[in-house]
Image (cartoon, grey):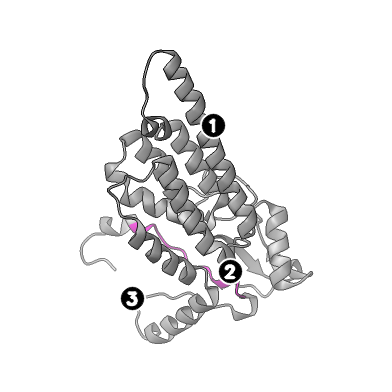
Amino acid sequence: MTQSSSSSRPLAVPRGPLVRMARFGGLAATLAGSVAVNGARQIAQGKRPKASDLLLTPANARKVADQLAHLRGAAMKVGQLLSMDAGDVLPPELAEIMGRLRADAHFMPSGQLRRMLKQNWGAGWLDRFETFPLQPIAAASIGQVHRARTVDGRDLAIKVQYPGVRRSIDSDVANVAALMRFSGAVPKELDVAPLLEEAKRQLHEEADYEREARYLVRFAELLRESPDFVVPAFASDLSTHEVLAMEFVEGGADRDLGASPAGDP
């Protein structure tokens, strides 16, 4: 999950498989139109362009990446995975564009966030908090995290799942696969079928916040006697199938772990 950055912005998450499918259809139509226009232009110049050259352009890759970032959920997650697995065989400029999906994620506008929290906590949810900033401290493909303080003094990290993510996983994966093949973003020599099946499995697990809560509690039990590990306390009163609340614990990025001197915890 990435920290919110200057390139992240509030953008409503399209919800429901049909709405999301329409987004994919619109993008495919846009790419087809781009191919037709660019093909006609090159033919008029006396060139004979190949369809793959017309599809696999930086401009089209940017359109695909932007749409996946807008959709978030399984669509963005599969795009991230494909950008990693196919990155070595893509032209450098295309790999860089698709790699942006791994860097930043947009977050829900305050209105959509409030609706999600009202659905999960009830109409008076804000009365339970001393502070609840509406802009998250981090956002990713499945959800976003807010740091909040309750009226009883708990400092919490609250993960809110994007609306409709769980119901759209399978259709998103299928639609992304079809879009990637159509756009030429996935090389023919790359067998993505195993990747897509694994992506579905992982996404269903990641979107299961109740399962994650059980593991959080279990790890706290197993490691409670170990001074080398800190497991955030689970806040069961504020957790649902779409919201996971736990104690906020300061930490560093995993990329910084290798920089620690030998022997440091």
Give 79 or 243, whichever is nearer the viewer: 79
The quadrant the C terminus occupies is bottom left
Residue 80 placement (x, y as % from top left): 41, 52
Dot 1 or dot 3: first in sequence order is 1
Disc 2 packing (10 Å; few <14; some 14–19; many ≥20): some
Give 134 or 55, whichever is nearer the viewer: 55
Dot 2 or dot 3: first in sequence order is 2
What is the span of residues highlighted in magenta in the rendered image?
240-254
On the rendered structure, is 61 left or right of 169?
left
Disc tally is: 3
Was residue 138 drawn as part of the magenta stretch in this picture? no
In this rendering, does residue 76 appear at all?
A: yes
Residue 110 placement (x, y as % from top left): 69, 53
Q: Which residue is mark 1?
A: 33
Marks 2/3: CA distance?
A: 22 Å
The residue at 46%/64% (across/down) is 250
Disc marking residue 140: none
What residue type is disc 1 on?
A: Gly
Question: What secondary structure is marked by label 1?
Answer: helix
Marks 1/2: CA distance?
A: 51 Å
